[in-house]
Amino acid sequence: MSGDQTFDLKSLQDEIQEMMSPHSALTKQPPFTIGQLLIMGFVFAKRTGRSQPQPLRSAKMWIVKTLEFYNNQAVADFCSSSVKRQVAFRSEIKKALEMWDLPVVGWESNALGGVRPATDGEQVDSYKKMWSVHLESVRTYLGLDARRDVAEEPFPLLDLPAELRVSIYELLLGMPRSGLMTEKSTDGARISLLSRDFERKLGNWCFHKTESRSRYPHSDFQKLAGPLASDHLAILLTSKQVCAEALPIFYRINTFIFLSWDNLATFCTKISMRRLMQIEHVAINWTQEHGSQPHQAANMIASMSRLQKFDLWLDESDREPGVRGGAIRRGDFLRDLIKRKVQITVHGDCPKLEALVRMEIGLLESRSAER
């Protein structure tokens, strides 16, 4: 389990136990998310004096043994209930583990019998991984800090002028210029930070071809090693006012990068429409293989009412001619963005798409001049 080895684990467990006690014997669903319950389970699965990662089953068993609701609902493999309920709970656990603000680190077994940090791109069953908890983030994630007496006092940040608070939020929540890269995972969308400014390189910025014609992330754009996203976003849990002030800034000042239209669709289903409307800069990679997917995502882009910039990255056009052009003619989703005066930047080699953008902009300018 990651974190400071001097961390008072016993005190943390006592606080969690106190918080859980009123709900342990109830038959109705407790007011905790599956993610929060998993974190509690990992905390109690840790053995004193040992920092090894824990198997997912340990946390799952703790949930079932501690809460009567989940015990009755047969949410563990060893419970005698319907298979559908077991599968549903298993799916909820996997989705929770894919949430990018969950303060956990996945580990995988190596050939020598030890463990190594799991790589984001590796498709490994969550139940085959070992998991460790980032202890310093547990209190904030579970809302235990709000239970302390000191939290009842006025938060000093809110006494600062509004302009100064905005500057603090921007410094804290503004990610590197390379942006936030969203990747589709087994059950959700994981967000990673890129270590380079993608605007410095045109063309196939995130893909390269191999003899097998498979496509893999480009080695020049490794993910950024840094603090967990929950460390940056923990300020949102301070109070409702801070969340209301800071969350729009997070979506406004960061660039959200999607490796495919499928990634965009997955991301849009994981956040609320209110948050989607706050995004101002989107970059997406459009390969010839995507076919008609751009038109399925058109409504999602249209719902981003505050979108100001749209970057379209294209791979090399050295395959069958007209594939992408045919997809464009079926929808022309860019017209809506052009009418809204969204700044569109096309990177790569696709004369048909560039010509379409120029033509639409020219038509709008002509209509404006006639008026």
Image: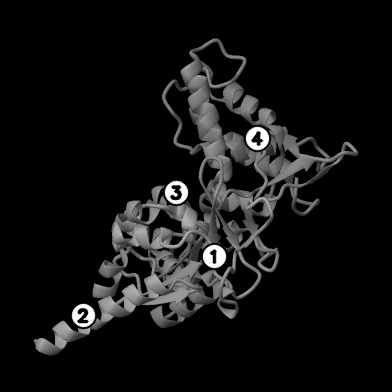
N-terminal of the pair, mark 4 or mark 3, is 4
What is the CA distance from the residue labelled 1 to the residue labelled 4? 36 Å
Does the residue at mark 4 contact the one at mark 3 (Cβ under 8 Å)? Answer: no
In-front residue for pair 34/147: 34
Q: Amino acid at mark 4?
A: Asp
- Tag shown at residue 318: 1
- Helix, strand or loop under label 3: helix
Q: Residue furthest left?
A: 371
Mark 4 crowdedness (10 Å alpha carbons): few <14, some 14-19, many ≥20: few
Residue assigned mark 3: 266
Q: Amino acid at mark 1?
A: Asp
Q: Nearer the viewer, mark 2 or mark 1?
A: 1
Residue 267 visible here: no
Residue 113 spot, x, y in % from top left: 88, 36
Q: Amino acid at mark 2?
A: Leu
N-terminal of the pair, mark 3 or mark 2, is 3
Left or right of 201, for residue 69: left
In-front residue for pair 54/307: 307
